[in-house]
Amino acid sequence: MPTILKLFKLQIDEKMNIFRSGKWWKVLLTIFLYLAIIAGASVGLIYAFIRFNGIGLAVDTNLFAVLLMFTQILSFVIALGSIIKNLYHSKENDLLMSLPCSHNQVFISKLMVLYFNELVANTLYTTPIFIMYSFVSNVNIGYYFLCLLFLFLLPLMSLVFAGFFSIPIMYISNKLKKYPVWSSVVLVVVVAVLVGLYMYLIISFTSSIDFSGKQSTILSNINDIIARISVYSGVFRFMAEGILAETGWWWKDIVIIAVTAIMFVLTVLIVKKFYFNLAMKNSETTTKARRGKDYIEPPFKSILRKETYTIFREPGNVFQYFIFTILMPFIVLLYDKMLLSITVNQTGQAMIVASHVLVVAILAMLSNIVSATAISREGGNFYISKLSPASPRLQTNAKIVFNLFFTYGALIITAIFTAIFTDIPILYNILTTIAVAIMSLGHIITSVLIDLKKPVLDWFDSNDIEKMSKSTKISMVLGLIFAFLMFIIVVVFAPTSHTELPWYILIGSVSLYTIAIMIYYHLRINKIYQKVEC
Amino acid sequence: MLKVVNLVKTYGDSNNPTVKNISFEVNDGEIFGFLGSNGAGKTTTIKCICGILPFEIGDVFIDGISLKENPSEAKLKLAYISDNHAVFERLTGREYVNHIANLYNTPKEERDKVVSELLEAFNLSFAYDRPIKSYSHGMKQKINVIAGLVHKPKLWVLDEPLLGLDPQSGIELKKIMRKHAQEGNTVFFSSHILEVVESLCDRVGVLNKGYLVGVIDLHKLKESGQSLEEIFVKLTSEESAETIYIPPRDVDVDNKEEGIKTEDFKITKIEKRTKEKASKTKKSEKIKKKDQK
């Protein structure tokens, strides 16, 4: 077997447990499940779009271009993330570079792995769209062949462009490496700007829809919006025409293939040149001395300081903590603006207020999820905390307070933004904030307890901990359930009362849960903590 | 200073305890070595003694305080140096030492004195304000030692302390261990290196497959002219658990915990087998005498 293929197999085996297990029925089952998801999504899309088409939604080139734009932008973002993570930041780099093969062979094998991953992900959401179009729209025979070609070409395009853009990103990120807080702030600002732009586009396009009007008017409005987006989608419109085998498709496809090929060669040559230096730079550690100052303080404050330092000096952690603090006010504001711009009847008004509760609660719960790795994040260092004479309750309290600081900060800023910039009644706004704040406390305590009952302490890297810990997933599902239940309470009681009653019921319910979990936490935390083996 | 009584530790749902009914006592001002082959249960015992690992049966007393009853108070008296040199790497050496000192409520003068003394001894001042992430293996061990001693623990527990240290630092650490014991404190450490144990310790506990198979007084051993190596090989050989057992001194080995019978443990089996062997020898001697007649 050639060295490149050996390296490719080594990495695929490492990343995909099913291949490593050697059980063929598991491999076949996974492939079957993958195909079943595609088939299920295809059937769902076909059913939905036949119905929408029947009542007036145009399933044409415009819609295809818009769908292509959304899926391929998503694909590009995923590819960019996986290139940065697997090509430059991967811990395998040290090992692979030490094997008896050239850096170019390592680089090409890594590209093959990335292409394989991109192909698997892209096919999952592109194939159902392609299949749906063959049923709903009038396509000619050439479309089927072009679909097959583009199923392999689209992931390559995402990879090539992401690879190209990853170089300046890595260059800047390495420059900012000495200042982890700044690099995290830059990352958060970039994400906030992108999300803000995305929300702004949605609002500006949906604000013209009159949801209280007739169905035909709504669909006609949607057709207009899709056409407007399609005009701006540029390259995706060009690709849509090429795939749908419309007039002049062949030269469009030749242009797409040629551009991809040129970009591929260019990117491979450029990335290859920088790869080794950029990848190895990430293995180096900074030795810059910090300001030396002794501090004497009580254990609780010292633990809070330790949490702050260990979290804020790891860019990934800062991102996790800050992202919702920064995004929550903007997302809630834009969401409220979007909902309030829609013309609705009285029941619709109640739904808008309930939706406000839902969005605030979901974002707050997502911000709380970091607590589900509060203990696991200490990894192999947990023994230091366990050895400490500070009581377990004091230690976990510090972690809870640390998370609350971010969630409550985000909630307060969100409440201020909502009060200033939207028409949501101030009392509803305040009561929503109080209810979500109480629920957040309950959710954070629950998350810490979940983590403490089954911590993952064999890892030091926060990415590995996130990957190995099931607590994050459980905490997320619980958080979403809490948020949804809060929404239901407001929806159920709002239309009949027209008063603050739904909020009082809401605050009562969340307080009950939070008090119950606090009592359990108070009584059991020391015992649960002592049982942890590390 | 340290009293371990009938300690039993089992991991998860295993039927086979890793530490099997261990009892021993270490006195004030003593350096006690813990010897044993890989997987004998040294680290597990040490982690139980430090309150890092929970244990099902038995108890550990540090300066008379039960680790089970008053873990926080007991932990105030001890320091532990791990064998894996794990430490909060995002902190600088100074931040880490300050954090640990704060947890133990150590006064400023006390911590300043210990830190400056040890920084000089280990030649680590140049890196004290650098992130621990940039430290070498040995430097991490040194900062762990400084953080461990900053509150002047009465019991200092070290797991394989010389692992990864350069010769100069190894010599310094041994000096510090001796000095700590001379000040009336207790040093308890595990090691694979017999020479280190022999040169440093007053007494040595030998662990084999989870059993404490012997506690050896090194001063008496020297007087007898025997070598530690010889005894260690005997104690940890395949047959040792059945043939040789040196009961730990001054320790009541009877299990007082409910649900555990002394017969479950090899101590009794060893005694039985020794008696059986003795009676067999007597029988064979009688036969020999008869034959001679």
Image (spheres, coloured by chain):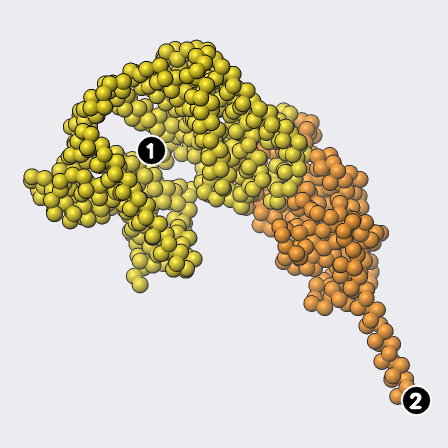
Chain colours: A yellow, B orange
SS label for mark 1:
helix
Q: Quadrant of residue A421?
A: top left
Res. B224 visible in picture: yes
Residue indicated by mark 2? B293
SS label for mark 2:
loop
The chain holding disc 1 is: A
> Residue B277: image x %, image y %?
81, 72
In whole angstroms, how far apart are the C-alphas of marks 2 and 1? 100 Å
Q: Residue at x 34, y 39 (%)?
A: A81
- The residue at the far front in this view is A496
The chain holding disc 2 is: B
The quarter of the picture where the C terminus of chain A appears is top right
Q: Residue at x 71, y 37 (%)?
A: B71
Please indicate whether residue B156 sits to the left or right of residue A267 in the image: right
Relative vertical location of residue A430 with respect to residue A398 in this rendering, above or below: above
Per the rendering, the mark at residue A172 is 1
Relative vertical location of residue B255 with respect to residue B119 in this rendering, above or below: below
Q: Residue at x 68, y 34 (%)?
A: A389
